[in-house]
Amino acid sequence: MAAVRKRIPKEQRKAEILDAAVKVFAEKGYRNASITDINEAAGIARGTFYLYFDSKKDVFLELVESYFNQYARILEENQEHLRNAFETGTDPLVSWRNFVLAALEFHSGNPELTEIVYRQAIGRDEDFSARVEVLLEDARSKVLDGYKLMAERGLLRGVDLEVATSISIGAIVYITMDQVLRKRRDDLEKLADEIVDNQIRALASPRIDAEKAIEVSKANRAAKA
Amino acid sequence: MAAVRKRIPKEQRKAEILDAAVKVFAEKGYRNASITDINEAAGIARGTFYLYFDSKKDVFLELVESYFNQYARILEENQEHLRNAFETGTDPLVSWRNFVLAALEFHSGNPELTEIVYRQAIGRDEDFSARVEVLLEDARSKVLDGYKLMAERGLLRGVDLEVATSISIGAIVYITMDQVLRKRRDDLEKLADEIVDNQIRALASPRIDAEKAIEVSKANRAAKA
Amino acid sequence: MAAVRKRIPKEQRKAEILDAAVKVFAEKGYRNASITDINEAAGIARGTFYLYFDSKKDVFLELVESYFNQYARILEENQEHLRNAFETGTDPLVSWRNFVLAALEFHSGNPELTEIVYRQAIGRDEDFSARVEVLLEDARSKVLDGYKLMAERGLLRGVDLEVATSISIGAIVYITMDQVLRKRRDDLEKLADEIVDNQIRALASPRIDAEKAIEVSKANRAAKA
Amino acid sequence: MAAVRKRIPKEQRKAEILDAAVKVFAEKGYRNASITDINEAAGIARGTFYLYFDSKKDVFLELVESYFNQYARILEENQEHLRNAFETGTDPLVSWRNFVLAALEFHSGNPELTEIVYRQAIGRDEDFSARVEVLLEDARSKVLDGYKLMAERGLLRGVDLEVATSISIGAIVYITMDQVLRKRRDDLEKLADEIVDNQIRALASPRIDAEKAIEVSKANRAAKA
DNA sequence: TATGAATGAGAATTCATTCAT
DNA sequence: GATGAATGAATTCTCATTCAT
């Protein structure tokens, strides 16, 4: 018994299981996915799974954490750029637009992970919703910080930043889920333009001529490319 | 055996079970809620449940359908008002704002149902996601129709209506989930104003002076109240 | 509530329920038949059933008892005839053949009851198999008595009457189940002839010329008709 | 949790469960036997059962199939012998008698399986009666083939072979159920003699002197032993 | 008498997790 | 490390029976 399988480095084996898990969870949903499904997809035996993870919840959370880690990096990079833009006097709208595009690309490039986070993890499953709540709030506060920075520099009109943040996140998440994942739209550049255009008009300070700002920003981007 | 419980009209009993179910599902999540939980919450015996519903999925879907029925009514009423506004020459922005407020009030007044729909029903649970998908698409197309109507009358700039619809729905859902349900904000009127203000600026035709339109609309509302 | 249904004499209602029950049990089997099925077939409400019977087992047993009562009467009549034949000196083989035909006709005329007794009641269901065992043994001993009578009068060769009885009953039951109920053969007269012919040859005393006995018996029957 | 039990080879474990199941089904009947009963009898946990069988119906049918497989082998061997007898000119009645004895021994040696097949499996339980019907018909047709062969060789009088088959099967089944299983008669040789004696007298061609045939056959057997 | 809503014991089945090999 | 047979808690669902109306 115990047909011995290839012995591969610990980290690689773990990565293989995570790969299998993300597919299985996205395909069947957390509830309907069984550990056995994951094991089969990973080509390992029942017991092997538990050498790498403590439980079903554990793999799932690891995937969710990985999503938020990656997304946090994008948000932080954007903050950085924005701050740099203000310091160097370059157009902050370019940072803004870059962020939106980066977000769309990240989600669109990780459809299964996105599916898992926004359609599986969010759903009061005592198991992990507390942790997911924290992670979401973290991400949200990073977005909020971006708006605060822009507000401080007089870029925004006197909107309720909390509300603006919710609208902004809601918009990006929905566009991603709906237009990108479901309807397979792949003109991400154009979507990013639509979104930023919308946001500038909605949020920019009256001192800023939104129309013109968008023109300038487009020109800048074109020049950059 | 058979500790007898007071008999109540069939419709009332069913309503009681639905009431219990919505609480249980919102509290524990679809996955973690057992039929026994619902029965206990409703104060009935195990078997009684099955006199009114075929399965756990069945109650759940009935709740979800009820959400969408109610929401559909709100969407249709809004369409009606908007159409009337165009016909009678009254300010369509008032209809627009009324709709946003009605949506916020509906969700805020039905927090558990909202929770269930947006955090439980949306999540690839083969059991019902097909049906939920259809319902969501129905609702979405009603919102889209509203935008189409406004676009036809020259109220909007040349935005991609699909994208605008996703942004709009995402915004309202997120605001509801985040600001209303989670953070218990109850200044719905103010939230509605913020949202509509945002949307007008983002979407209104350049021929319309958003700034002014918002002023007028506010005045109208005030007069009405 | 409680839509009042026709009030009919107690005995008639009971008969109606039995009628419904025999059909339902034969159709679905004891196990798969639900009281509700019977109630629906009888056009009565759930509770009404229990005004006439104590339990599911109770109706079923009542049907089984009814089968054995009817069959017992046939067996007793046959005994009677046989005894008369011996007394009056008429051909006992005519009685024998009459009995076989009567048995075939009875079973063939009550296919559902037969089905119930031989395919449902016989099957160690603690519920009622003890009682069924007794009833079967009763019937068996009546058949055995017939053979004993014939043996006493020198009609049979020195066979083991117990074995002969089993063979005889097995034959009739199987023929009924197989040829009559399953294959819908309706030439009962011919079947009876085959069976009796068989039995005479197998069991008749060597002093009796089976060949001739059968001829005579046939002639007698023909004369009678 | 998970009080571990000694691991035994898969085939052995399955055999143990089947052993337990045959006892439980014979004891309580299919309907009254619960999977838990089988598990307890087999000394395994609830879930273990499902590693080997899909359902209660599944184990049951496996037992039934096993009965018919074993019986089919006996029937086929008998056919073979009979054919050989005709070819080599040895007494076919010896084959006949061998078969009857083998059948009695098989059933008497597997009382629980016999009980299950003839008292549980035969009974319109939608679950499996279709399959059982097929198996019974298969067995029946093998018996019929034996009679056809004998008829072709002029061994039988012009009886309706269908009827003869039913009588023959009914006789053996009833004798087994009644005399062997219920009344614990163990003089199988004598029973076989009685049955064959009966059958020869009932079915043999007039050209054959049944009386003498039986003598010869008995002598042959004695010589053989 | 008749009704049918309500009851709850009981059964089958699933699957995350354990651990002897 | 790897395996996979075994475990058993937990869940859904059925249906004979009761009894207030």
Image (cartoon, coloured by chain):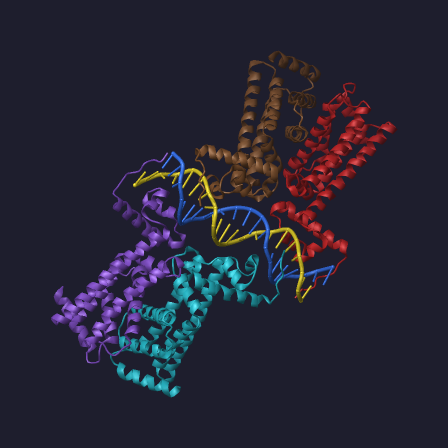
Chain colours: A red, B brown, C purple, D cyan, E yellow, F blue
Residue placed most toward the observer, A30 or C150: C150
Q: Residue at x 56, y 61 (%)?
A: D44
Q: Is residue B33 left or right of residue A172?
A: left
> Can I make out residue C172 in this image?
no
**How many marks overall?**
0
Query: The C terminus of chain D appears in which quarter of the rendering?
Result: bottom left
Asked if residue A77 is positioned above or below residue B223 in the image, the reply reads below
Q: Say above or below: D188 vs B212.
A: below
In this image, A38 relative to B66: left or right?
right
Q: Position of residue F3 (x, y in %)?
A: 67, 61
Percent of width and height locating residue D77 = 42, 76
Left or right of D166? Residue D5 is: right
- x and y percentages locating residue B121 in the rendered image: 59, 38
In-front residue for pair D1/B83: D1
Q: Quarter of the image holding residue D189? A: bottom left
Residue lying farthest to the bottom in this orientation: D223
x%, y% of residue C73? 22, 60
Q: Do we see residue A155 in this rendering?
A: yes
As drawn, which residue projects farthest toward the right?
A: A88
Q: Residue at x 49, y 63 (%)?
A: D21
* Residue positioned 54% across, 59% down in the render: D49
In the rendered image, which quarter is residue C88 located in? bottom left
Q: Residue furthest top?
A: B223
* Quadrant assignment, res D204: bottom left
Which quarter shows the N terminus of chain D? bottom right
